[in-house]
Amino acid sequence: MSPSNKPGDLAGAISDVAAPKTIPAWASIRESRRSSAAVAGASGRPGLSGLAIGALLEWLQGNGQPAFRAKQIRDSVWRHNAATADELRGLPAALQHAVGEAFRVDTIEDDEVTVSDGGLTEKTLHRLAGGALVESVLMHYPARGYDGGGRALHRERHTLCISSQAGCAVGCPFCATGELGFGRDLSTAEIVDQVRHAARRLAPTGRHLTNVVFMGMGEPLLNLDRVLESVAILADPLQFGLGARHVVVSTSGVVPGIRRLTALGPQFTLAISLHAARDPLRDVLVPLNRRWPVAEVVAAARDHARVTGRRVSFEYVMISGVNDTDVDADALARLLHGDLAHVNLIPMNPVAHTPWQASSPERVAAFAARVRHNGIGVTIRANRGQDAGAACGQLAANRAGEPPAPTVAHRREVIIRASEAALRGERSGEALSESLEAAVKPRSVRR
Ligand code: SAH
Ligand code: SF4
């Protein structure tokens, strides 16, 4: 795990600037970039929005400034979504200049915005220092279900899906980010600046973000310190002020990370990407399963729900003929029997370079009925932004360019071979990739 800011530690804050890296889609990045030397950024300036209050106060004091400037700076960052130093309101020009020299007021650039679903989905490709690309998706859900008095039973929502890493080491074969491989962890400021960008987009229309979900690029529990810092900033009424209940963090099953969250108590809603209830198949769909088998993941989730009193949701991407059979539905129901759990079924978003298709709506409905029949709550989720390449990591993958044809053909062949073996019930004997092995070392999830 890369180092993160201790409150009041400016040096820690400075090391929070991550290393530049552009990810070639066709070359999975094997090497981990988690050492503090590796995360010393090109510019060396920490992002202002991720700075602990103690670090900001210390910097102000060191520059002979009164403490009340901290509130002015925070208000500019969080109430007015300042993007440049001269947008820091109420500060003398010399102080604006000094802040701009010491910190980056904004750590991400919007490289491309793609609007789809008739304006309901806005996907942004962000460029980070050093050139790495990550995505966030803003989804609008209009109010629905009005009562006799004309009041909406379900208020309108504006949900932002954000990234925690550039690329991902886990390598799920249906995921565009997984194909990219691991690039680098995002800094705390890079994570929360995605939220500030979305808030800035909404502001002119008087709308506000209502939910933030860590379901973009990357495995949040492999960048857990920074994700926790980001969630604390988002929840802080003096900063973003979003209730922790409105934040969801999704994980592919980093068991020590889940256990650490359980010990911390409820911070946000936890979602587990399950995708298969049987180990042989999950070994292929979520390669992390070879390290933490599905029963361990579900046991950790069960303990989390029991200790925190918060329901855990399970995500299940539906892939035609692979994990959508009646046998899979029954295995899923058996696995979650008696749990405080809810399953979200998501038809697979089409991504390049997989040999698979989404399950048909009829199959998804039949699967849902079978699981529900066993007493488990199920919701069928609609896919958003298919016309805009909404699958996680797809825009970044498109930008990284088309891999050589033999690489694509080889990847397809490996996926087909592995899934056929899994469907025969054979567990994968394949070792985890080096980058995943490095990412899941115990130090990655403990502090
Ligand atoms: N790494 C974390 C969070 C980011 S992925 C995780 O895996 O949970 C967020 C969600 O998007 C996961 O549930 C993931 O399985 C899903 N996803 C990835 N690729 C997808 C695709 N092609 N179609 C539908 N869902 C996809
Ligand atoms: Fe990583 Fe999540 Fe994509 Fe799997 S689904 S490769 S864990 S981002």
Image: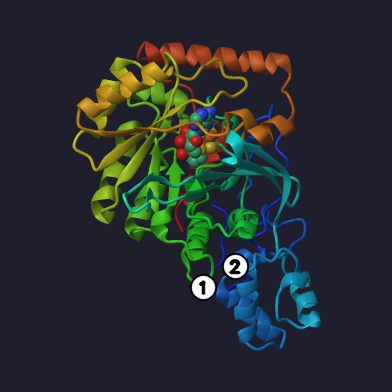
Name the residue rendered at 55%, 29% in the picture. Answer: 175
Query: x and y percent of residue 428 in the render?
Result: 43, 20
Image position of 237 with respect to 61: above or below = above
User: Residue 178: x percent and y percent?
Assistant: 57, 32
Q: Count the marks: how many?
A: 2
Q: Position of residue 393 (x, y in %)?
A: 61, 35
Badge 1 residue CB within 8 Å of ligand 1: no
- List the residue tagged with mark 2: 78
Circles 2 and 1 in contact, beta carbons < 8 Å: yes
- Front residue of this view, candidates 8 and 201: 201
Q: Which amino acid does the dot numbered 2 rest on?
A: Trp
Look at label 1 and name its amino acid: Leu
Is 147 positioned to the left or the right of 74 in the image?
Answer: left
Horizontally, residue 6 falls left or right of residue 257, namely right
User: Residue 239 location, x and y as percent?
Assistant: 54, 69
Circle 2 packing at 10 Å, graded few (<14), some (14-19), many (20+), is many
Viewer-side residue, 342 vs 20: 342
Q: Is residue 63 visible?
A: yes
Query: What's the residue at 42%, 42% (across, down)?
Result: 254
Residue 327 appears left or right of 7: left
> Is the image coloured rainbow, by chain, by secondary structure, or in one colour?
rainbow
| Quadrant hosting residue 17 | bottom right
Residue where numbered disc 1 is placed: 238
| Disc number placed over residue 26 in the picture, else none | none
